[in-house]
Amino acid sequence: MTTERTNTKSTHHNYRALLMIGSLIAIVPAIACTNKSKPTSQKSLAGEVRPAVMEVASTPAVKPASMEVVEKAQTPVKPALKPLTFKSRDYGVSFVYPWQYTFLNAKIVAKDETRHPKSDGNDGQFTLARVEIPKGFYADTDLDSAYFTLSLNEDLDEQGCAASISPDKNGEIQNETINGATFRWSEMENGGHGSASKVRNYTTFANDTCYEVEMGVKTQSDGLSRELDPDQVMRRLNAILKTVEIKQAAKTPAAPQLKSSAEPKPLEPQN
């Protein structure tokens, strides 16, 4: 009896031990699963995942509109160059010409015979001014010279002034009114041996003076340069002619002779 109880008791203990071992085997996987599915803490998450950082792209600094306006206002602006005016008060005549052209006064023209205008047949003729178009305006062409001259002759009367204009190749003389003054004019063309010229002469009588204008375009071919159209250049010279104005000349009054009313002092005797 005692032996059977002992065996029975031992068997019972073994059975309980097996149950406990089985329970432990079942619990361990559950604990492992529980640990794997446990959410990570914010601290660990922050250590593994870095939050995205927004980077601001650098852009060039843009000046306010007000600042740009101020800078532009401070920049000096070169004034536009206006046409130049030749004016003679003594003879009451003036004309306007572009500032890019070359101006020659009476002294320069008088010293250079190649720049003298066509003679009117009287020694009293003299040139007041001459304007030339620079050759650079017609680069790579056969232009030799293009000019506008204003001359006077006080020795010619009105009839002689009118007669100084020669008829053109058709035997004609034309009239043109410019700023109230009536001009007689004609055109002459000459050429040969690679050179050519087109010249227009104008005259009008006012202030007891014969006013004379000569415009000319001369070319000289060298076999390489481009041939120039003289009428194109003549239009530039004609633009100067359209500005010629003749007004009443400023006559210089004669110096008055002053008479002294004081009586002469008697000569003092010399010792």
Image (cartoon, rainbow, N blue to C red):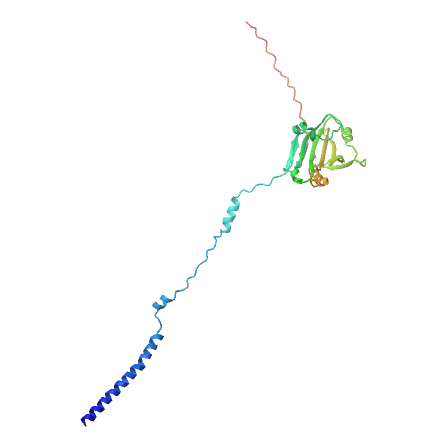
- Whether residue 176 is visible to the viewer of this picture, yes or no, is yes
Q: Tell me residue 241's x, y (percent).
A: 70, 37
Q: Is residue 20 above or below residue 207?
A: below
Q: Is residue 19 above or below residue 256?
A: below
Tell me how many marks there are: 0
Instruction: Quadrant for residue 144, please give it.
Output: top right
Q: Tell me residue 135's x, y (percent).
A: 66, 37
Q: Is residue 240 above or below residue 71?
A: above
Compare residues 86 and 265 and report the one nearer the observer: 86
Instruction: Quadrant for residue 190, please give it.
Output: top right
Quadrant in the picture for the C terminus: top right
Which residue sits at x=51%, y=51%? 65
Which residue sits at x=20%, y=91%? 6
- Whether residue 246 is visible to the viewer of this picture, yes or no, is no
Instruction: Quadrant for residue 9, please give it.
Output: bottom left
Left or right: residue 2 versus residue 61 is left
Q: Tell me residue 89's x, y (percent).
A: 66, 30
Q: Tell me residue 165's x, y (percent).
A: 77, 32
Compare residues 224 and 141 and report the one nearer the observer: 224
